[in-house]
Image (tube, helix red, strand yellow):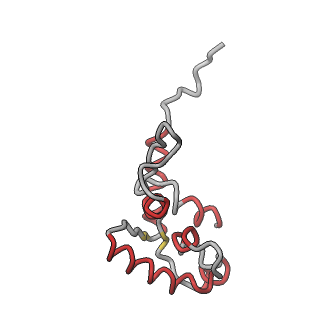
Amino acid sequence: VALLALLTPHANTANHFPEVGDEGDLPVSWLEHQFRSTNDLSICNWFSKHVMGNFNYHLAHHLFPQIHSAYAPEVTACIREFASRHGFPYKEYPLGICLKLHYELICRNTEAVDILEEDM
């Protein structure tokens, strides 16, 4: 269950991971990189709050790792407002959509391999 909340906010086709430049730098700021490469899960229930520690508010976790998870919903409201005001791409999806986007990434990055072919 923890992997669902960990993989889907990062590794999917909706998130953008820019190429690192020759000097090892990113073409965007650290803040913009967090918005582009992370999304939130739109599950807000007892399980996500008490068992997962509000981990579905994943962008808040990246931007403010020192805050207690109990404050994540309020911080996320501020993040949404900030993103809207400054043109940052805030993304939030239901778990089913996140799983679909993750599956699409896996399919896009796989190679066609004939597992029955002998290579000896």
| The one of 118 and 16 positioned closer to us in this rendering | 16
Measuring from the top left, give residue 72's x and y in whole percent.
56, 81
| The one of 24 and 99 positioned closer to us in this rendering | 24
Residue ID at (51%, 54%):
11
| The one of 119 and 36 positioned closer to us in this rendering | 36
Residue 66 appears left or right of 37: right
Measuring from the top left, give residue 32's x and y in whole percent.
43, 62
| Image mark count | 0
Residue ID at (50%, 46%):
25
Measuring from the top left, give residue 93's x and y in whole percent.
42, 69
Q: Is residue 49 above or below residue 8?
A: below
Residue ID at (43%, 64%):
97
Residue 88 appears left or right of 40: left
Residue ID at (32%, 77%):
85
Q: Residue furthest front?
A: 23
Q: Which residue lies furthest to the top in this view?
A: 120
Quarter-of-image position of residue 52: bottom right
Quadrant including the C terminus: top right
Quadrant including the N terminus: bottom right
